[in-house]
Image (tube, rainbow, N blue to C red):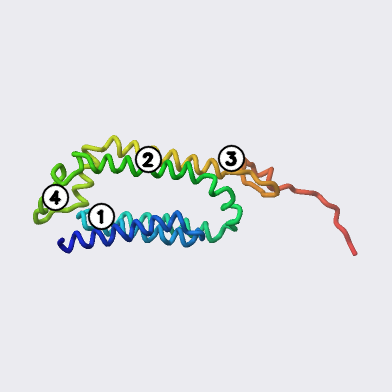
Amino acid sequence: MDFKTFVFYILAAIMVFAALRVITARNPVQAALFLVLAFFTAGGIWLLLAAEFLAIVLVMVYVGAVMVLFLFVVMMLDINLDRLRQGFWSYLPVGALIGVLLVVEMALVLGGRYFGLEAMPEPPAAQAGYSNTRELGRLLYTDYVYPFELASLLLLVAMIVAVTLTLRKRKGVRYLNPSEQISIKRGDRVELISMPAEKE
């Protein structure tokens, strides 16, 4: 066993342990921190596969942005853990069945003849001046430009839906109407009143 394979097994074991702790941790903050650990180890595996750009994006986007936001929301919300645990064991048979089906599917896919060492040998060493980021960008904007645009459209729709779902009208809050502000006239803002002079 060479050093690269040894490092892969170490990172894979850490990632499996972190993933198990994400779903078994009682504290949601601890679960989120274990998910950060899983993302970091997944980035290390990407580095072993010579995909530096994907590893950096995984760490920066998921760990640096998504997980920080998730931790902020979890710590700001007053989560009632006792109420969340109610009825947990009633979902155990369904969850166990789905987990067994996922394991069987992964075993069938990875154990077949399409994903073995013979079908997918180790790629040759990269030439001098090879850029993983440039090659990924070339493939995204040439061969996979339509799926890339479709994914961006789906993300845009998801963003609009998220804003629409969180847009609520609350009582007792004053709202500004930009169209009324633009269409208002001087006479509507300033009113001159004639008052008699008063003397002490």
Question: Which quarter of the figure is the N terminus placed in?
Answer: bottom left
Task: Give how far apart the Cα atoms at labels 1 and 4 are.
Answer: 14 Å
Dot 1: element? helix
User: Nearer the viewer's eye, disc 1 or disc 3?
Assistant: 1
Three-letter residue code for mark 2: Leu
Circle 4 residues within 10 Å: few <14, some 14–19, many ≥20: few
Three-letter residue code for mark 1: Trp
Residue 145, percent from left and from top:
26, 37
Q: Which of the labelled discs sits on residue 46, or is there none?
A: 1
Q: Are marks 1 and 3 in contact (CB under 8 Å)?
A: no
Disc 2 or 3, which lies upstream in sequence?
Answer: 2
Question: Which quarter of the figure is the C terminus placed in?
Answer: bottom right
Circle 3 residues within 10 Å: few <14, some 14–19, many ≥20: few
Q: Which residue is under mark 3? A: 179
Dot 3: element? helix
Q: Which of the labelled discs sits on residue 122, or is there none?
A: 4
Q: Are marks 1 and 4 in contact (CB under 8 Å)?
A: no
Task: Give how far apart the Cα atoms at labels 1 and 3 are.
Answer: 51 Å
Residue 5, percent from left and from top:
19, 59
Q: Which residue is under mark 2? A: 101
Task: Give how far apart the Cα atoms at labels 2 and 3 are.
Answer: 56 Å
The residue positioned 24% from the left and 42% from the top of the image is: 140
Q: Nearer the viewer, residue 24 or 33?
A: 24
